[in-house]
Amino acid sequence: MSRSIEGPFLPPEGAEPRICFLTDSFYPIIGGGENHARLLAREMTRQGGAVFVLTQRRLSESPRYERLDGYPVYRVGRPGMPRLGKYAMMPAAFGFLMRHRHVYDVIYICGMRTLGVVGVLCARLLGKKCVLRSESCDELRGEHLVAGAQGRPVLRGALEAWRRARNHVLLKADRFLAISDAVEQEYRENGVTEEQLTCIPNGIDTETFSPPAPGQKDALRKRLGLPDGRLVMYTGKLNRGKGLEWLLQAWKAVSKEYPEAHLVLVGSGDHQFLSCEAELRAFVEAHGLHERVTFTGATNRVADYLKAADLFVMPSESESQCISLIEAMAVELPAVATAVGGISEYFEHGCHGMLVPPRDPEALAEGLRTLLGDAQRAAAQGRQARQVVLERFCIDAVARDHGILFRELVR
């Protein structure tokens, strides 16, 4: 990459402050965090803000820089390294932020697991403002850092020392943005002060994610090559931790009772070191479910798939908020979701669908049976679900709140 960003890729003219979105995963990678960062940057740009994105170059075909949705995107690091690439990005991101210190005022770190230390250190060295946002539970607590060291006391001790040192740096950020009560509680329990804390949920585009028009559902099914009958949809990464192995176990039982029902897994595990896509496909083949389960692969047509569906399922083992579920609710889909993280803060059991415990295929199966067995009740729950989204998660309001926060920081 050029050592200069002069030319057409400078941050757009707009109201100060100038914001650098720092994230280790971004479009064209598809996922809840990636989609939200892209949408938020687009909406803040539309509202007159000056935004650019600094991210990892995961795919060799991705340009090192481009203008996307009206704002610049810069990709650094080496592609083709799903397990180590995000760590290899750390020195590249540090160098970029130091070299181009004059084109931003605030570093907004979307996900602190990898780049939190980089962003905070640069901000402290350069006198910039820094905002940290967890995209999942446990990012600040850091249990994931030592989870693999069970029974190895020396390694665990070293990792514990790293966690303490890391958090000593992270806690010097100007603000911590909590997207849910669960994340807010984690922040408080790990040293974030009242003055550092701001609460803003993630948001979605409620025009793109809206109920299908009359006749649109059938037309979309034909266009997308989906079968007739009751469609149960999952959207998101095909990664470990998403509970998809439990979902397939549940679906094996449910599909026998509802032979007209079909499960559609919208998403991919490509370029993700936590991918379990191969194992999921093997399970489907081994248990004769290939005619009852569809894998779509990576797609930009998530809204179309949701509009073609009848039900949504989110079996995740951990979620800070879960954008995929909120998008489904906006399309008026009733859902079966696990009661983890921030989901139960806005998703009400019996009102918007069914809440079930994680890692429990029998409970998942029972929730699916309940909604598949009463289409009228399920449709009513879907309508109520959209009202929650309209009241709490519209991206225009979320972007305005971010703008207020950033302006307060540099005032």
Image (cartoon, rainbow, N blue to C red):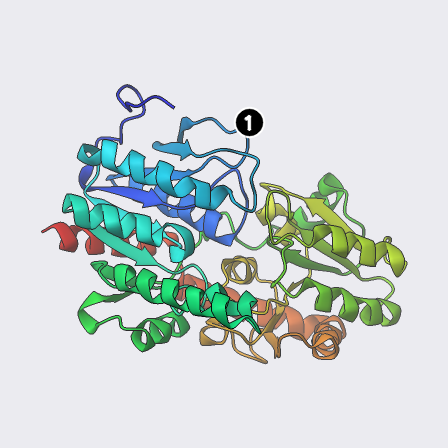
Residue for point 40% across, 55% down: 111
Residue for point 81% across, 71% down: 254
Task: Give residue 262's position: percent from left, percent from top.
Answer: 79, 58
Q: Nearer the viewer, residue 9 or 401?
A: 9
Task: Please say whether residue 105 is visible from this viewpoint.
Answer: yes
For residue 324, which quarter of the picture? bottom right
| 237 relative to 176, above or below | above
The residue type indicated by label 1 comes to: Glu
Residue for point 49% across, 58% down: 323
Left/right placement of residue 37 relative to residue 47 reads right
Q: Nearer the viewer, residue 148 or 186?
A: 148
For residue 285, which quarter of the picture? bottom right
Residue for point 44% across, 64% down: 159
| 294 relative to 171, above or below | above
Residue closest to the far front: 154
Task: Please say whether residue 25 is visible from this viewpoint.
Answer: no
Q: Mark 1 highlights which residue?
A: 61
For residue 6, which quarter of the picture? top left
Residue closest to the far top: 7
Q: Quadrant of the N terminus?
A: top left
| 387 relative to 218, above or below | below
Task: Give residue 204's position: percent from left, percent from top.
Answer: 44, 54
Check disc 1 and report its element: helix, strand or loop. Answer: loop
Left/right placement of residue 75 relative to residue 11 reads right
Q: Nearer the viewer, residue 134 or 301?
A: 134
